[in-house]
Image: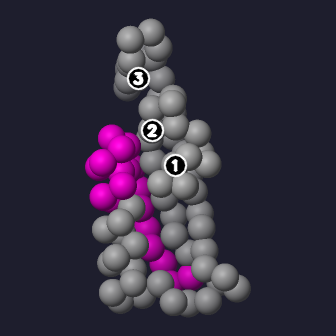
Amino acid sequence: MKGLKSTAQTKYDLRYHFVFLPKYRKRVLKGEIARKIDGMIRYAAQVNEWEVYELAVHYDHVHLYIGVQPKWSPSMVMNK
């Protein structure tokens, strides 16, 4: 199968789609704050060997579509 990644005993293509937002969906994610959020997410992905397929920081929410290894649960990814 094309596009699958593999470890010692498994083949996988695990992707998560996260949407998270500030309290009361206030429009605070702009300018320097948006750049810092983008940088922090990309840095965490690089350190943990995740693949960012799509990342969009809007004024009132963030979309993140990310590929991870099977050892990472969605809660662990968001915790990092």
Choose between 1 and 33: the one closer to the eye: 33
First in sequence, mark 2 or 1: give its number.
2
**Left or right: where does residue 33 sit relative to residue 14?**
left
- The circle drawn on residue 68 is 2
Instruction: Using the image as rendered, state which of residue 78 and residue 52 is in the foreground.
Output: 78
Q: Residue at x 44, y 9 (%)?
A: 9
Q: Position of residue 55 (x, y in %)?
A: 41, 62
Q: Residue at x 44, y 41 (%)?
A: 67
CB within 8 Å, label 2 to label 1: yes
What kind of residue is marked 2?
Val
Residue that numbered label 1 is attached to = 77
According to the picture, the residue beneath numbered tag 3 turns out to be 4
Is tag 2's residue or tag 3's residue first in the polypeptide sequence?
3
Percent x, y of residue 44: 36, 55
Range drawn in magenta = 42-60
How packed mark 1 is, by other alpha carbons closer than 10 Å (few <14, some 14-19, many 20 or more), is some
Label 2 to label 1, Cα distance in Å? 9 Å
- Taking 30 as reference, is 21 left or right? right
The stretch drawn in magenta includes residue 49? yes
Q: Earlier in the sequence, mark 1 or mark 3?
A: 3
- The colour scheme of the drawn protein is one colour
